[in-house]
Image (spheres, coloured by chain):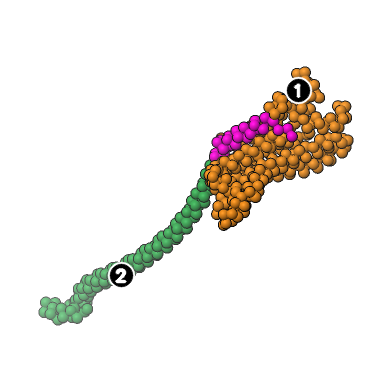
Chain colours: A orange, B green
Amino acid sequence: MSQDTGITANQYIHHHLTYWTVGHGFWSLHLDTLLVSLTLGFVFFFSFWMAARKATSGVPGKWQNMVETLVGFVDTQVKETFHGRNKLIAPLALTIFVWVWLMNFMDMLPVDLLPRLAQWIGMPFGANPEHVYLKVVPTNDLNMTFAMSISVFLLTLFFSFKVKGIRGYVKELFTHPFGAKNIFARMALALPNLILNAVETLAKPVSLSLRLFGNMFAGELLFILIALLPWWAQWPLSFLWTGFHLLIITIQAFLFMMLTIVYLSMAHESHDSH
Amino acid sequence: MNIDASLFAEAIAFGLFIWLTMKFIWPRITQAMADRVAKIADGLAAGERGRKDLEHAQLKATEILHAARDRGAAVVEVANQQASRLLEEARKEAQMERQRQVEAAQAEIRQELNRAKDALRTEVAKVAVAAAERILSREIDPRTHKVLLDELAAQIH
């Protein structure tokens, strides 16, 4: 692909890894990520809403059946992990699973398809094709993954406060996991406990976000590298990697959902009983 | 690292889709599924109830059938008895009628016979008298011998 446009491999990769951005510095937006993620989000919502709107308790249609299978699957996962009562967790998990999967699925499209399309569309408007950027996979954007993981993190904090109270939560930061009967021993253990808990708490959103991002970044990069190979090598390698990556995107969407459920259910558990 | 304001935009989008799912998708789908579960359970229960009812009805039907058969057999028995009794009566009646007819016929025959005998007796007496007249026309006076002749005639039975 790079040969016919007359740019170097380095430029090609760089072009593929650059966002379509407006604004400057921190106050800028990745329009490609926003555009694709919102489109897919609404695709998810409207397609599921179609089934939900006409949902019948009689014989379901094919699409309703599909949606029910997914809902049932997510519901089972939530019920197996989380035993409390929370109306938010299951719909949240469904949203994450389907939306993340759809966004990951953008990786399955030929790596040059949408960026090239964007260049063609941009040209009549006087845009230089070299400067039309479109990064197709939204989960290949740290903003996207962190937006979700930080939201989940804030929700865990919210539910922790709700269940244990702010005071109980803060108390747990200092007295858990190492507890002691002796007041001096407890004071001595307070700092190590705080450090441990801080690391544990902060590691959750970071790992949740980076795991998804890393997998998608690696997958995307591999497609880009395959696209740089001679044409006869592209076919078998693309085929192989697409098949393999199809598993990865599903597993990553599932993992993101499962870990979210686990984190939220952990937020509901109190350690006072230890 | 390209962290910028997209983070906030995506977080808002994330929240929006969660809210939409929670509001418009999840309750309806789970409701439909729960309703279907209830429906299927009801259907199965109704099926079970129907099966039990059928069993019950079959048992009852068999009972009724047996009772009807018994009653039918009893009726047939009574009818048979009645028929044989009627037959017997008819036979007796016929026997008696025949007896009566025979007796009447015999009586008639006897009467007829007596009448014939009487006629014959008279005839014989006449013939005897006539014959005797011829033989004894000169010697016997019918008037004087009438007692004798009557005696003779009376001896003929």
**On screen, A47 above or below A120?**
below
Q: Is residue A92 magenta?
A: no
Amino acid type shown at disc 1: Ile
Residue range (magenta): B1-30
Q: Which element type, helix, strand or loop, lies under badge 2?
A: helix
Examine the rendering and report whether any part of residue A247 can be seen: yes
Quadrant for the N terminus of chain B in the image: top right
Q: Amino acid at mark 2?
A: Lys
Residue at the (75%, 31%) spot, across then down:
A135
Q: Element type at marker 1? A: helix
Chain bearing tag 1 is A
Number of the label disc, if any, that sits on residue B92:
2
Q: Residue shown at 71%/36% (left/top)?
A: A142
Give the left or right position of residue B122, taking residue A62 as reference: left
Q: Which of the 4 image quarters holds residue A138?
A: top right
Position of residue A262 measured from the top left corner of the image (x, y, whole percent):
62, 47
Q: Where residue A103 sits: x, y (%)?
A: 70, 36
Main SS of residues in magenta? helix
Question: In this rendering, is residue A166 above or below A178?
Answer: above
- Residue at 11 percent of width and 77 percent of height: B143
